[in-house]
Amino acid sequence: MAQAYVLSLRDRRATLETVGGKGASLARLLQAGMPVPGGFHVTTAAYERFVAENDLMSGIGTALEKADASKPDTLTNASEKIGDLFLRTDLPEEISAVISEAYAGLAQVDPAVAVRSSATTEDLPSASFAGQQGTSLNVRGEEELLEAVRRCWASLWSARAIAYRERQGFDHHLAAIAVVVQRLVPAEVSGILFTANPVSGARGEIVINAALGLGEAVVGGLATPDNFTLDRTTLEVRERQTGRQEVETVLTEHGTTERSLDPGRAAQPTLDDAQLARLGEVGLRIERHLGSPQDIEWAYADGRFWVLQARPITNLPPSDVRWEPPIPGSAWWRRQVVENLPEPLSPLFDELYLREGLELSIDDMMAFLGLGYLHIEDFIDRPIFATVNGYAYLRADYKLRWRTAAVYLRVVIDELRLLFGDETSAYWREQALPSYLAKIERWKAEDPSSTPDERLLAGIHELALADARYWFACALMIARAKVTDALLGRFLTLAAPGRGLTSGLFLRGFPSPTVDAETELEVLAGQVRSSSELRDVITSTSAAELPEALGDTPAGRAWLNAFSRYLDRYGHQVYNLDFVAPTQADDPLPVLLSLKAMVQQPAGDPRARQRVIVAERDARVEETAGSFDPLRRRLFRTLLGWAQRFGPDREQALFYMGAGWPTLRSLALELGRRLVDGGSLLEVEDIYFLETFEIEAAIAARTDGEARPELARLARERRELREARKSLHPPPVVPPDHELRFGPFDMSTWETQRRNEPDGAVLRGFAVSPGRVSAPASVILSPDDFLQMELGTILVCSTTTPAWTPLFSQARGLVTDVGGVLAHGSIVAREYGIPAVLGTGVATTRIRSGQTILVDGDAGTVTLLNSTGEDDTRRSVAEPPPKTTSNARRAAFVALVAGAMIGTAVWWRIRRQH
């Protein structure tokens, strides 16, 4: 019996079930002759005996009753109560005796050991659970050891571990934990080795992080390690980056402490090339033995490398990623609706929205246009939307297939008639939007908890298609805005060269839901500023804990009610159009973060700011018009009138994109809960990673009282693939070297990303909001990073949607990978009066948070600066000139389109009068 409680570290009975993930991995490494410090396992059987004999599960269950993963403080409270149970309960004598015996069997009297937890849900290929449980270093003597074992057991119930198990879909009561006790290595240098590049996924590279002393200073964020990239074949160093280390973790008589490093020692390399090659070979041996890319914890002491841990690298990006068209010979680009999809798509969204809904939306558009003599296939093949490596793309291999010039001219006239007539606005306002909102209200009235499985799925399907089909009404409104903006912009370039006039100067200060939402947020912030009680709570409480903290006082509850009304009006706004991502209503944490920042700033008045912008805009209009001769002045005012008439419609229409997602998500999550209970999913959110026919199969199995575990595995694999693909950077065009053309016309000017070189100090983009600003950058990749947004910095992101708007109040400028002059970020930047450059294509990969950059919203450039404020040209190369057409061709194009538009408008006005 006692044998089951302790095993030698290399014992062949050391499996995942008996010694946990870390312990099983170390046992395999020792059995293969790898340099692992010796020691022993305290098995899961010991933990289970300890829990059962002291009836701890009842106390654990009681502590977890009020735990809510969305409220961190409840997890902390539960964890503290459980931890107290473990630490004040004595070990059964039989267990303490065998642990003491194993410890006495180590080489010396009271040796220093490392005591590490090893959970059965740890170090798995699909979920590492790294850092979720406890470690104690430099433990000496039986009494300290037994206490350290209890701390490791209690760490199975840390707040982080509880939350992580819930996110990964693991049942708390099935989790168990073992303990690894090893001789302590007094490390001179320590770190992590990856046998594949964890960022790029490159299998031909080994990445090594190294820091002086024990690794705790790095883990605790007190030191930045050196970073080395090795060639896997030759083990030669390809790249080295020197970290910054001012302190190191060292051993004390009991435990560890941080000690300041002597500057001379801190400046020395942690490892030389020969040592790196030796360490790289150890890593490759481990990978060959374990059969997959590994994340290896190591230490160096007395001229020898030791392996302290090895686990599979989770979410490793796919290797040898190729950006090839899904259909041979086709071409694709990331524009239009795709601009609102910055991340890889979830499979359910891909199926319902991209492959089904948007294709139907195109059919709706053609029917509305009434061009019965023309079909979409006359100039583009289907499918029109597809994914490449999980990212959404729009087809771009356009072809001129029209039969005669007369047909072409008829299309131009009909299109312009619709663009400039009242039918488009009337269709959006009186048909498309009311129909979509009615569907939302109908499904919102349903109680998901009492709705049959099949009907829940039907609701998901109907709402997804409804939003996708609403897109074409938005596209019509966007088309008018884009065409009129492009004509105004081209006119300014040709009629006023060198004057820095852009269309964005004249398209500011218009009413929009964005300004309305900001105004209401400012009212909420003002209520906090005027109440010392509210101000104290909000400034001293983390955003995640605010709802509970405010709920404890009458004033707080009143404020929460007002905030709830705000979310009722604006909470449908999406961070990402894919319904796998929560909306503001589903996850208001980013809004609360922005509110906390607003409260600490002087009171603002969005309406007053808008009035100033309107005055500046109108003054610029008069100044510009006065500088032209009568003919150009007349054309300027005509084009400006069109752009200012149709430009604001874009934001009004797009405000409702994703409006059905809070309702759709409530239906989906209820169905997901039922399929988790039925054993066909591991986690509620995995519902988004099955397609409809698979969900139907899971529903049928649940009806028959059966489970479909293979669907649970499939959904989890797809979810992990999506996470891995997030590290990829999709090119603006696939294939990347494709030149976009429409017959004889160059379409590259319509791209929403510049094709910048991978190096260079200057990034080219689109000048969308005027002005120049130099400041540090805050690189924000998703709503999860909103907490990292620093006041007074330049917001750098892939793209923005309406739900990102609260960040603008903290930003001095904006830079994005994707977007043009009429993108959401452009419009909001102009309303906030901050310089913006959009569509750089590579900003989020080239710019680091904290790095100083210069944003020139007049020239459309972003300059990367070094610490002295100079251009960072260490690796710069000559920037290629942007592809342009000749002035003659531009002038001819503008004259043709402007003439056609003016002629059509006159013709349409005469027709209406008669």
Image (cartoon, helix red, strand yellow):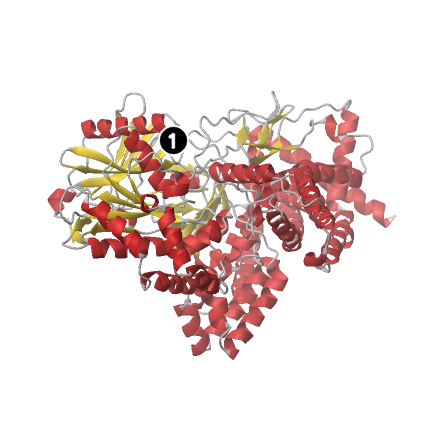
* The quarter of the displayed image where residue 388 is located: top right
> Dot 1 corresponds to which residue?
293
Task: Please indicate whether residue 849 sits to the left or right of residue 148 in the image.
Answer: right
Question: Which residue is more in the foreground, 158 or 628?
Answer: 158
Q: Tell me the residue at 77%/22% (across/down).
A: 403
Up/down of 295 relative to 612, above or below: above
Up/down of 406 relative to 851, above or below: above
Q: What x and y, as percent, mark residue 179?
A: 32, 47
Question: Which residue is more in the foreground, 382 or 374?
Answer: 382
Up/down of 534 relative to 65, above or below: below
> From this viewpoint, which residue is outermost toward the front?
1
* Mark 1 nearby-residue class (10 Å; few <14, some 14–19, many ≥20): many
Q: What x and y, as percent, mark residue 586?
A: 57, 57
Q: What x and y, as percent, mark residue 311?
A: 36, 37
Amino acid type of the residue tagged 1 in the rendering: Pro
Kindly tell me whether residue 336 is visible in this rendering.
no
Up/down of 58 relative to 250, above or below: below
Q: Tell me the residue at 45%/59% (across/down).
A: 57
Kindly tell me whether residue 190 is visible in this rendering.
yes
Task: Please indicate whether residue 704 sits to the left or right of residue 56 in the image.
Answer: right
